[in-house]
């Protein structure tokens, strides 16, 4: 196993999150998957263990860590269950807009809540606006000291369960992407409602709903930064959050390697463990190597973000792209190594394969990640000329 | 409320191996943990603090490395931790151990409640908790599965028995030993873990606790371990069948043979 030379604090986060994954999450993961329940009891465990505050400034009651610390935690929790871990990881996605663009009053109020275990959600995607954020139809119309929000957000992780929603809506449609603005909306605000939960292939221990705004009136103090910054808020948020999705993928993938190794060691055919066959060994070796490479990429991208490097969009996209493709591949291989047992829900690997798939899709499909990476390559070529 | 919790560091029994020649534990390379029963005592102490305020002081008697168990206690919410350690304590039996711990508790001074696990997973004697209360001349309730209420100088607790449970009212201060049914111990928090790295461990030796040297260590221990062995497994009994008269006759024959030989 590679040594990433963590600080004492990072090592502590890793050990505690693994302990939570093993003792609290793993035993209930199959049940949450089957019943599609939101893991409130695990949220409480994480909150009590200070995990929600890992990436929040100490000033607001957090632990003062950064993206690397968040990635370490997300990876370990996802090893336990990629769906349950999302209650924590998607809260990060909903919180980054406030960390990056919130004013002091907004940070004081909302970051303190998150550090204590309040769940948050990020609302960007709509039926006709995903990666093309310029196509957003939800509007926020200024009305004196207030904004009136109307529209429907789709596939919102932590929807209905979160208490804090960061929302991107159009304040000036005529300006396209530059007419978008970001807001904080609290659950319980009149005009804010949620559809029923979506039924999903994987990550079924997380909640995904529509978030609906019908003449939802919020005070102008809920605006993040200034009008027209919505698109930039979203892009900067993703630059910071993609290592988190990548870490989720690494955690799921590592679990697949661990399960496959343990199973092939105990499964006997022709009088010996199947792990003694070279064909199986080569698969295990490739899986472990790919996961380690993904992990190295994720940690390094996270460190760059934490160090305040400017051009992070490319590496952030790279780690998300690579780690999620690795997760899909090794979980599929794990099912293969389990043979017929792998296809059965009684065994843990088919769930890993279902959970892995989303990491190639959300927070920008892997095709969009490739576009981001290529665009950055071309941009830097142009600069160097 | 001043709460004292006594803990013991023990080898993790899930990976303990026995040396078949000497019948003793092979301790090399075996991870040390807080005695599992003591984790329930610590959790209950922390819950009492959360309910009533005050502080939790954790005491352990053991070698210097028992400090690790005390740091873990801090990561879970203990306020002060005390390591009672001295070469002169070596070889203590349960009497000498409970005397030593009671002397440390006297030095701590004010307390309302002392909580211990029902027994340690290595010695399994269940004697040290009751021993401490005897030395301190305070009441004890063993096998506590619930603390119902504590106020105006008394506590009402549920004591587990083989058939059910007893409800006992006791004046304070009291020593309780607790069973695993009492709670579900929490995991450490990150802030607790950070605190545990930096916290000061109070260290007391035999002189610090004014221990009488005749009452500690091997010299102060009235019991000796003569032999450790695995008791033979109970074998299945013989079922007598037939009419009551026949069974009585058969039984009487067996007794006669056994007595007469």
Image (cartoon, rainbow, N blue to C red):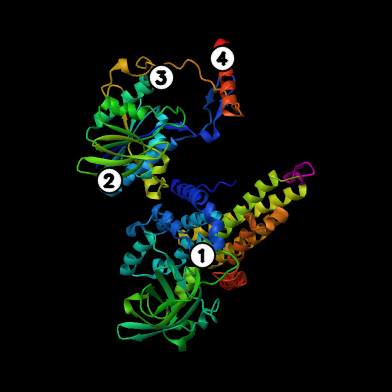
Question: Which chain is home to disc 2?
Answer: B
Question: Which chain is home to disc 3?
Answer: B
Q: Residues within 10 Å of mark 3 (few under 14, many from 20)?
A: some
Disc on res. A206: 1
Seen from the viewer's position, the closer of residues A150 and B232 is B232
Mark 4 sits on what residue?
A: B256
Q: Residue at x 57, y 57 (%)?
A: A30
Mark 3 sits on what residue?
A: B91
Question: Which chain is home to disc 4?
Answer: B
Q: Residue at x 45, y 27 (%)?
A: B123
User: Which label lies toward us, 4 or 2?
Assistant: 4
User: Which label lies toward us, 2 or 1?
Assistant: 2
For marks 4 and 3 on the same chain, the one whose residue lies earlier in the sequence: 3
Residues flagged by tags 1 and 4 on a common chain:
no
The x, y position of residue A329, in whole percent, is 67, 60
As helix, strand or loop, the secondary structure at mark 3 comes to loop
Q: Is residue A175 above or below residue A245?
A: below
Query: Marks 2 and 1, how far apart in space?
Result: 39 Å
Question: Which chain is home to disc 1?
Answer: A
For marks 4 and 2 on the same chain, the one whose residue lies earlier in the sequence: 2
Query: Marks 1 and 3, how far apart in space?
Result: 55 Å
The x, y position of residue A66, in whole percent, is 44, 58
- Report if the CB atoms under discs 2 and 3 are less than 8 Å apart: no
Seen from the viewer's position, the closer of residues B73 and A143 is B73
Q: Check if residue B176 falls in the magenta segment.
A: no
As helix, strand or loop, the secondary structure at mark 2 comes to strand
User: Which label lies toward us, 2 or 3?
Assistant: 2
The x, y position of residue A84, in whole percent, is 51, 60
Seen from the viewer's position, the closer of residues A297 and B207 is B207
Q: Residues within 10 Å of mark 2 (few under 14, many from 20)?
A: few
Extent of the magenta region: A269-277
């Amino acid at each position: 196993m590679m040594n990433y030379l963590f600080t004492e604090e990072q090592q502590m986060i890793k050990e505690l999150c693994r302990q939570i994954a093993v003792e609290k999450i793993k035993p209930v993961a199959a049940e949450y998957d089957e019943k599609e329940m939101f893991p409130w009891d695990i949220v409480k465990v994480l909150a009590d263990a200070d995990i929600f505050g890992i990436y929040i400034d100490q000033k607001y009651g957090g632990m003062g860590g950064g993206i690397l610390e968040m990635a370490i935690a997300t990876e370990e929790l996802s090893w336990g269950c990629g769906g349950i871990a999302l209650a924590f990881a998607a809260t990060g996605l909903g919180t980054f807009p406030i960390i990056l663009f919130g004013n002091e009053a907004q940070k004081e109020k909302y970051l303190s809540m998150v550090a204590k275990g309040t769940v948050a959600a990020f609302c960007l995607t709509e039926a006709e606006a995903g990666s093309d954020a310029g196509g957003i139809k939800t509007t926020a119309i200024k009305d004196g000291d207030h904004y009136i929000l109307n529209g429907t957000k789709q596939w919102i992780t932590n929807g209905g369960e979160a208490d804090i929603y960061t929302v991107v809506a159009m304040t000036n449609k005529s300006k396209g992407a530059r007419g978008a603005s970001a807001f904080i909306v609290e659950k319980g605000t009149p005009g804010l409602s949620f559809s029923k939960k979506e039924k999903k292939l994987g990550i079924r221990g997380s909640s995904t709903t529509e978030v609906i705004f019908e003449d939802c009136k919020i005070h102008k103090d809920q605006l993040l930064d200034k009008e027209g910054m919505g698109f930039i808020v979203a892009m900067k948020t993703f630059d910071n959050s993609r290592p988190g999705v990548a870490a989720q993928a690494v955690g799921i993938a590592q679990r697949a390697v661990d399960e496959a190794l343990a199973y092939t060691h105990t499964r006997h055919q022709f009088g010996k463990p199947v792990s003694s066959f070279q064909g199986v060994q080569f698969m295990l070796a490739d899986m472990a190597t790919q996961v380690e490479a993904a992990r190295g990429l994720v940690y390094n991208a996270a460190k760059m973000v934490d160090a305040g490097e400017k051009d992070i969009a490319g590496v952030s996209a790279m780690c998300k792209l690579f780690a999620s493709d690795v997760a899909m591949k090794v979980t599929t291989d794990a099912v293969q190594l389990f043979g017929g047992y792998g296809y059965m829900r009684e065994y843990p690997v088919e769930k890993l394969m279902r959970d892995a798939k989303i990491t190639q899709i959300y927070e920008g499909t892997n095709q969009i990640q490739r576009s981001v990476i290529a665009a950055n390559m071309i941009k830097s070529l142009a600069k160097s000329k | 409320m001043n709460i004292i919790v006594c803990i013991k560091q023990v080898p993790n029994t899930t990976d303990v191996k026995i040396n078949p020649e000497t019948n003793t534990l092979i301790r090399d390379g075996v991870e040390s943990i807080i005695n599992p029963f003591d984790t329930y005592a610590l959790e209950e102490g922390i819950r009492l603090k959360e309910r009533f305020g005050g502080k939790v002081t954790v005491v352990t008697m053991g070698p210097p490395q028992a400090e690790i168990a005390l740091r873990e206690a801090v990561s879970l919410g203990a306020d002060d931790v005390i390591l009672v350690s001295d070469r002169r304590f070596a070889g203590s039996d349960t009497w000498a151990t409970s005397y030593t711990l009671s002397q440390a508790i006297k030095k701590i001074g004010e307390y309302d409640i002392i909580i211990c696990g029902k027994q340690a997973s290595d010695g399994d004697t269940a004697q040290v908790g009751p021993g401490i209360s005897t030395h301190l001349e305070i009441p004890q309730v063993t096998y506590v599965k619930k603390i119902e209420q504590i106020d105006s100088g008394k506590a009402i607790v549920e004591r587990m028995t083989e058939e059910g449970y007893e409800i006992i009212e006791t004046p304070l201060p009291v020593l309780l030993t607790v069973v695993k049914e009492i709670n579900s111990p929490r995991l450490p928090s990150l802030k607790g873990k950070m605190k545990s790295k930096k916290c000061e461990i109070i260290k007391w030796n035999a002189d610090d606790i004014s221990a009488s040297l005749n009452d500690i260590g091997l010299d102060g221990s009235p019991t000796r371990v003569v032999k450790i062995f695995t008791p033979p497994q109970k074998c299945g009994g013989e079922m007598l069948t037939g009419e009551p008269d026949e069974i009585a006759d058969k039984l009487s024959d067996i007794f006669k043979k056994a007595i007469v030989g």
